[in-house]
Amino acid sequence: MSLTNRLSVIAALAVAVAVVAVSGLAFLLVREELHRQLDSQLDSDARTIAAQPERWIDKAPVQPVRPGKFEGDWRALKETDLGPRWQIISVKGVVSTSALPITDATLAVLEGRVVRSRETVTVAGEELRMVTLPLDAQGIIQVALPLEPLTDTLRRLAVLLTVGCLGGVALAALIGRSVARAGLAPIHQLTGAVEKVAATRDLQTAIPVHGRDEVARLAGAFNGMLAALTASRAAQRALVEDAGHELRTPLTSLRTNIELLVRAEAETGSGRVLPSQERARLMQDLETQVVELTQLTNELVDLAREETSPELPERVDLGDVVATAIDRARARTVVPIDADLITAELTGRPGALERMVLNLLDNAAKWSPEGARVAVGLRRDGEWMELTVADAGPGIAEADRFRVFERFYRSAEARAMPGSGLGLAIVAQTVAQHGGTVTAERSPVGGALLRVLLPADS
């Protein structure tokens, strides 16, 4: 069932429940009011007859009855077409005008156990509403009115209410469907625009936003998502293009050296032997190029992992993360690393933070001269955690300090060193994802100092 049909059904059901509830309550109130009016009329007629019973008897035939014997087959003594049916019973057993049944409630009034009784009785197949009141002369007065007029009125009212309920529900369904279509029209337009984007894959298509309602917010959210996808696609394209460019050089060099070795082996039988020193140089170049290619591939994988990391943020101790990264760095470098750490809790992705610190340490170790040391510091500065990694190398030129965090950027001095230019780019990306900043400065001993600021937990 479509959303329009569901809303139409919901509107019809809501109206049906409301109409049925109101109609049922109205029917009950009207029925109660009609019964109240009927009982009030009976009370009034009974009091009128009880005030002057002798005037109402008016020579009506009487039938003596033994005291206490009121049950039996009573026949009408006087039939009247209009007005109430009434009957007077005294303690002497005098009955006049109408044959009304003597019930337990009637006996209770006659014996003085209750002061009034109201009940519904049946006489000759006709339902009557009967009231019984005591007389001053030690007797009772019974007055009854037929219930058929009241029942007919209630029946007609029930038919009218039923027709009204059915008509109201049908009208509500039609109106609800029209309202649903009108209300969902922006949703249909938004759906069409999104389907067009999905079909054409044109992320530059903006979805129109009208007003400030929920649909407008949804359209704005879709536009934001499209903008994020556009930026992600552009970054992915740039990464692929840059990676292809950076991979082309080591692959070309690797292929050239391999071809030289293959040609040398093919010419061995002809007496043209490749000198051992040349062969050793080629093998060393191949090893270096394989290492660089492996490092570049690993850094590309790390960079892609940072862009689409499935790791969820959690509360971590940055001091423990830095200590773990230092242990890993010491296992793969001979450069001594000094650490001055504190306990620093923040919310982040521990794996990504550890890779970020390890890249900082690898960069510092690569540029550190023989005998120099790398200094790592972690301290709290207000609402920020400050991580610094300093080395004693040549430092970073001031003109390059803002570009060293770009992908594949390598300064003139760095081109003579092994590397891909992705390590600090991964650092910058991880720091930005955690809401922090990273800057390159000059260390106190003249080398490079990389300063990372991350928001600390309160």
Image (spheres, rainbow, N blue to C red):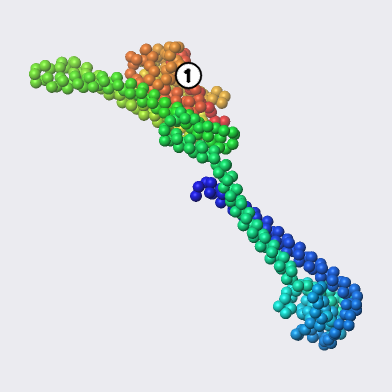
At 59% from the left and 34% from the top, the residue drawn is: 212
Q: Position of residue 289 (x, y in %)?
A: 28, 21
Q: Residue furthest left?
A: 270
Residue lying at the far front of the rendered structure: 81
Whole-percent x and y of residue 237? 38, 26
Q: Quadrant of residue 156?
A: bottom right
Percent across and percent down for residue 345 are 51, 31
Residue at the image position 90 percent from the left and 79 percent from the top: 54
Q: Quadrant of residue 300?
A: top left
Of the pair 324 and 59, the residue shown nearer to us: 59
| Frontmost residue, 111 versus 246 | 111
Amino acid beneath label 1: Thr
Residue under label 1, please give it. 439
Quadrant of the snapshot with the C terminus: top right
Give the residue displayed 91% in from the left and 75% down from the top: 52
Residue 255, quarter of the rendered image: top left
Above or below, 406 against 131 in this view is above
Q: Secondary structure at mark 1?
A: strand
> Which is more toward the observer, 338 or 416?
416
Which residue is at 78% across, 68% downward? 38
- Give coordinates of residue 295: x percent, y percent: 33, 25
Regarding residue 191, the answer to whether it shows in the image is yes
Residue 176 higher or lower than 135, as above or below = above
Residue 92, placed above or below residue 84: below
